[in-house]
Amino acid sequence: MADRTITVWVNRYPDRSTFLLQWIDPVSGKRRTKSSGIRDTGRARDRKDAEAKARELEQLLRRGVAAIPSEMSWDTFRERYEKEHVPSLAKDTAAKIGTICNYVEEIIAPRRLFDVTGERISQLAATLREKKKSESTIKSYLGQLKAILRWAVAQKLLPECPPIPTIRRAKKSSGATPMKGRPITGEEFDRMLEVVPEVVGEEAAPAWRHYLRGLWVSGLRLGESLELYWDRDDKLHPILPKPGKGLPVLRILAELEKGHADRILPIAPEFAVFLLETPEAERTGPVFKLPKQKFRRVEARGDWAGRTISSIGSKAGVIVRTDPADPKKKKYASAHDFRRSFGSRWAERVMPAVLQALMRHESIETTLRYYVGANAERTAETCWAAIPGARGSYAAAFGDERNGSRNTPPAETPAEA
């Protein structure tokens, strides 16, 4: 923003105990007044301190950075936030910030930053529900808005962060199945491979089947898979040493990694074997050479690939979630469900710390979600195996229950010691 000639002076009114800072607003032409916070005790030092405050405020006003919080427009604040803070954040976070800011402008329509009050934020949440947004999505949006407003407080653009509604119904899943999907089974994976030609065409089918197989055995996130290259050190790439010279690993650059750190991590043996299926002479460029995009060229490549996988899941009839509030609303298998399947399979093979490294989870709590279901199934198998004939008795009782009869005697249990 261009520098503006604004002069701030110190004034003192008989009915005020502090020095006042005043200037002429170049836009409205009106005199503006702000307390310096310096009390007039009669010492010369007091006025010097107030004049120092005036010079500090004058510089801020000339840069258009800040004045009185109530006078900063929402548009000016958003422009500054997106210029000074957003570039330091991940691309996905920046996209979420753009989305919530657009909703604020659409629903709250604030003229000033000060107009974003707790009451209006509550109205924002209610309107998002009317738009059929899930409680988890609303919680995510409000969390991002809270971070934005806290930044405004830190920059002294707001006196305090307005209250943000607590979304109590949006709870993290403590089980093996994340809220937005579930691991797909091997049979469902095979069904998806079968319908690939119906979605992408016969010519592109081999490349897409290769891609789906890669997601199945690697546990890669969608964005990581599209940034996986054979021969570029500036991209995510596998390192495949000769037998006896070490084990295969994956090198991830900080800008591509969700944890924002350069890391070398192990890869699953089946993924290493999968990579070796590509002849050495052909190991150039991207590992997954998908056909060129022929529609919606302005959208991100990841969005296009993700939507194509979801279309394949829909064609195969692989439903990973049904909305409890609206049974007609179903979610079909997506790229991330392949990752969930990978985590679920390996949860039965290795300890949590190993799975955390394999999945590249920043928090062990995320990894442990895969273990809850796996451990429950193993415990159930042990319990049922301990009682001879338990499965047969259950099957018989289940059949009698359907027929309205309960006459089948229970299975004999071992005498207690």
Image (spheres, grey):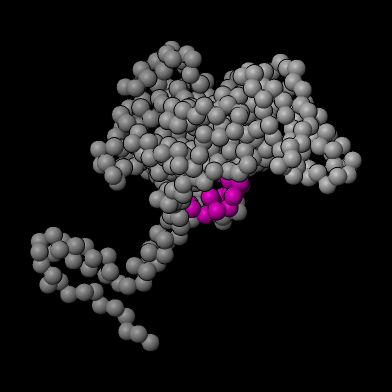
Q: Quadrant of the N terminus?
A: top right
User: Farthest residue in the right direction?
Assistant: 44
Is residue 254 shown in magenta? no
Residue 219 visible somewhere in the drawing: no
Q: Is residue 283 left or right of residue 175?
A: right
In the image, residue 82 sits, relative to residue 159, either above or below, namely above
Residue at 36% x, 17% y: name it.
Answer: 201
Give percent across and percent down for residue 67: 68, 30
Residue 10: which quarter of the image? top right
Q: Nearer the viewer, residue 414 or 251?
A: 251
Residue at 56% x, 56% y: name it.
Answer: 351
The span shown in magenta is 355-370
Is residue 366 shown in magenta? yes
Could you tell me how many numbered marks the image carries? 0
Residue 119: which quarter of the image? top left
Give percent across and percent down for residue 72: 61, 28
Residue 131: which quarter of the image? top left
Residue at 9% x, 64% y: name it.
Answer: 404
Q: Nearer the viewer, residue 298 or 404?
A: 298
User: Farthest residue in the left direction?
Assistant: 404
Q: Is residue 151 left or right of residue 345?
A: right
Residue 326 visible somewhere in the drawing: yes
Residue at 28% x, 69% y: name it.
Answer: 390
Secondary structure mainly formed by the magenta segment: helix
Give percent across and percent down for residue 282: 59, 20
Q: Nearer the viewer, residue 104 or 4?
A: 4
Q: Nearer the viewer, residue 91 or 3?
A: 3
